[in-house]
Image: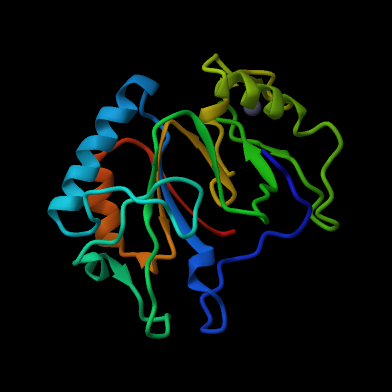
């Protein structure tokens, strides 16, 4: 994935901005590659039944792939209190292959936390936000291996234990690794209630909601 210098910027929802720039991706970080497509089909079936999205994918106005259009009841699952009317939601894009789901051009993790000892490997200088030379290299190698469907251990520089790349935490504000992702393009923030139900329907797998702008 591209790594662009710059401080991480939070999503903006002021009226002067095109809301279509904003997106949220629900990532299932636990599901296997084999289970991703059948699970996606079940989730879409539920969303269509609830009127959250329409059943037929169309070419997107924004986003990068075919997407399900917003359904008649999509306003029921978002908190649009900070959005100025009229706003128009984009589509729902579903990815069912291993991917790095990131928060857009300012997606930068400051560090990664070892699942074994809990200590943080700093990736960026706190003051200058410059990359710490070499710090990302073991993660980059693991990322490539993981995307190629391989195992992807990363050795902790503190405790020397190896842990799977996908078990490292602390990078969720910037990106997440998973085989199943649902990106809502240009929707106001999904409600906690909807996210909870979404997670329940993902068999209570570990999920991450990435928010960002393109
Ligand atoms: Zn460690």
56 vs 47, nearest the viewer: 56
In the figure, 34 relative to 13: above or below?
above
Q: Position of residue 59 (x, y in %)?
A: 41, 51
Q: Position of residue 22 (x, y in %)?
A: 51, 64
129 vs 73, nearest the viewer: 73
Name of the residue lying farthest toward the left: 49
Q: Seen in the image, is 146 located left or right of residue 39? A: right
In the figure, 202 relative to 141: above or below?
below
Residue at 39% across, 78% down: 87
Q: Position of residue 61 (x, y in %)?
A: 46, 60
Residue at 13% across, 52% down: 49
In the figure, 143 relative to 46: above or below?
above
Q: Seen in the image, is 45 located left or right of residue 32? A: left
Q: Seen in the image, is 204 located left or right of residue 127? A: left
55 vs 138, nearest the viewer: 55
In the figure, 132 relative to 105: above or below?
above
In which quadrant of the rendered view does residue 118 lie? Answer: top right
Number of disc labels: 0
Name of the residue lying farthest toward the top: 150
In which quadrant of the rendered view does residue 163 lie? Answer: top right
Quarter containing the N terminus: top right
Q: Kindly tell me whether residue 158 is visible in this rendering.
A: yes
Q: How is the image coloured?
A: rainbow
Q: Kindly tell me whether residue 203 is visible in this rendering.
A: no
Quarter containing the C terminus: bottom right
Residue at 22% across, 59% down: 52
In which quadrant of the rendered view does residue 144 lie? Answer: top right
Q: Position of residue 110 (x, y in %)?
A: 70, 48
């Amino acid at each position: 994935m591209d790594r662009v210098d710059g401080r991480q910027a939070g999503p903006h929802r002021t009226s002067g901005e095109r809301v279509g720039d904003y997106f949220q991706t629900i990532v299932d970080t636990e599901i296997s590659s084999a289970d991703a497509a059948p699970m996606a089909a079940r989730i879409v079936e539920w969303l269509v039944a609830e009127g959250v999205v329409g059943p037929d994918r169309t070419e997107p106005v924004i986003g990068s792939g075919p997407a399900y259009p917003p359904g008649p009841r999509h306003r029921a699952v978002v908190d649009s209190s900070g959005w100025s009317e009229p706003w128009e939601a984009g589509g729902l894009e579903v990815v069912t292959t291993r991917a790095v789901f990131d928060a857009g051009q300012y997606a930068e993790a400051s560090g990664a936390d070892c699942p074994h000892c809990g200590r943080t490997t700093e990736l960026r200088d706190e003051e200058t936000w410059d990359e710490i030379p070499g710090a990302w290299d073991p993660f980059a190698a693991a990322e490539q291996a993981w995307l190629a469907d391989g195992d992807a251990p990363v050795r902790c520089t503190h405790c020397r234990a190896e842990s799977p790349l996908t078990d490292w935490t602390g990078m969720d504000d910037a990106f997440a690794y998973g085989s199943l992702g649902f990106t809502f393009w240009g929707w106001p923030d999904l409600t906690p209630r909807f996210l909870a139900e979404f997670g329940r329907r993902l068999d209570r797998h570990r999920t991450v909601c990435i928010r960002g702008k393109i």
